[in-house]
């Protein structure tokens, strides 16, 4: 708090004080009071003003300086009232009480919205589980009548099942810590399960999978890892290059402090201008608009899950040549990787 700002704020007080002093001098002269007494009374009056304003400025400056300093250093600025003490001057007390009331009201609203969000998330999870039953039945019917319905019909059912999984994992990603167990997980088994689940899609597009060094374990949650790999594979199948045989290469690399899982395909690649935003929510990019309908949610959920699991996911690509996703797993479940 600057003294110039304080003086500007007190300008009306100084004007009234000056007017009062002028009227007092006028009456003193009118009653022919001695000059020494006038000087003495004016000195007392001015000394009172100076002392009162100095004390007022120092009291307010301490409070508002502390308020501003703490506010700048807080991430959650609504907690500012907990970082300062209630002042001993009236307008500061009003400000402090207003901050407390505002925080209380905000906390009540946040709690209400959290409860509403939790109810909606529970409903979505229930809905996904319910809708999976008829989808599974349709897949069984399609398998039993594959000659009549054809592979493309079954492929569309697979896509519906994949999208419902995506909804479920997105609903759970906000509270993933309640639904995962970090333990040693076989990369080879996770890759095999994902390949088996996407077998028909891989056969339909003629893609082959090459693996190297994946007979290794990593510290992660197996279910979430399979979902992450499934999203990578779905993108590889979706954005294949029509003029060459689709090849997906999955390899693992062991470093002193981490294990790197590389997932690489030889598809259409990602434009350099889109690469930095592929993990952004709802970002579809040039490929999503030109080659296939995309929600832009798959890689966003992958990034969110990796962050919560303590993994690091990155993307590299060259348009028209390849796309490679890399997931880094820490070797110690108590050690969080730094980029």
Image: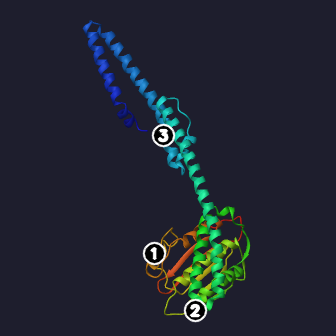
Counting residues from the start of the chain, the first of labels 3 and 2 encountered is 3
185 versus 115 height, above or below: below
x, y percent for residue 21: 31, 18
Counting residues from the start of the chain, the first of labels 1 and 3 encountered is 3
Q: Residue at image x 33%, y 9%? A: 37
Real-space Cα separation, disc 3 to disc 2, in angstroms? 68 Å
Q: Secondary structure at mark 3?
A: helix
Counting residues from the start of the chain, the first of labels 2 and 1 encountered is 2
Residue ID for mark 2:
206
Real-space Cα separation, disc 2 to disc 1, in angstroms? 26 Å
58 versus 247 height, above or below: above
Question: Split into 4 quadrants, where in the image is the N terminus?
Answer: top left
x, y percent for residue 35: 29, 10
47 versus 218 height, above or below: above
Depth check, mark 3 against mark 2: the one in front is 2
287 relative position to 313: left or right: left
Real-space Cα separation, disc 1 to disc 3, in angstroms? 47 Å
Disc ID at residue 65: 3
322 relative position to 273: left or right: right
Residue ID for mark 1:
285
- CA neighbours of label 1 inside 10 A, class few (<14), some (14 to 19), many (20+): some
């Amino acid at each position: 708090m600057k003294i110039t700002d304080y003086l500007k704020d007190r300008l009306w007080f100084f004007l009234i004080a000056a007017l009062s002093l002028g009227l007092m001098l006028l009456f003193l002269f009118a009653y022919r009071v001695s000059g020494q007494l006038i000087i003495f009374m004016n000195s007392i009056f001015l000394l009172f003003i100076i002392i009162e304003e100095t004390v007022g400025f120092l009291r307010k400056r301490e409070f508002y300086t502390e308020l501003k300093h703490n506010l700048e250093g807080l991430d959650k600025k609504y907690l500012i009232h907990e970082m300062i003490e209630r002042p001993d001057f009236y307008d500061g007390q009003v400000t402090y009480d207003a901050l407390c009331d505002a925080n209380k009201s905000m906390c009540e609203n946040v709690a209400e919205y959290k409860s509403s969000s939790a109810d909606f998330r529970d409903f979505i999870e229930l809905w996904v589980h319910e809708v999976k039953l008829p989808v599974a039945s349709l897949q069984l019917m399609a398998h039993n009548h594959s000659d009549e319905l054809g592979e493309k019909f079954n492929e569309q059912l697979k896509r519906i099942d994949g999208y419902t999984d995506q909804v479920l994992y997105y609903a759970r990603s906000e509270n993933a810590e309640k639904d995962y167990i970090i333990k040693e997980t076989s990369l080879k088994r996770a890759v095999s399960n994902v390949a088996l689940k996407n077998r028909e899609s891989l056969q339909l597009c003629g893609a082959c999978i090459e693996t190297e060094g994946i007979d290794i374990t990593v510290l992660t949650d197996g279910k979430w890892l399979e979902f992450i790999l499934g999203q990578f594979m779905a993108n590889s199948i979706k954005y294949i290059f029509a003029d060459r045989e689709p090849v997906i290469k999955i390899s693992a690399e062991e470093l002193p402090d981490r294990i790197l899982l590389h997932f690489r395909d030889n598809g259409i690649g990602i434009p350099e201008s889109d690469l930095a935003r592929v993990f952004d929510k709802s970002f579809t990019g040039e490929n999503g608009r030109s080659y296939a309908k995309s929600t832009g949610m798959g890689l966003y959920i992958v990034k969110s899950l990796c962050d919560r699991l303590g993994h690091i996911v990155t993307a590299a690509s060259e348009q028209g040549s390849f796309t490679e996703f890399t997931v880094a797993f820490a070797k110690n479940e108590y050690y969080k990787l730094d980029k």
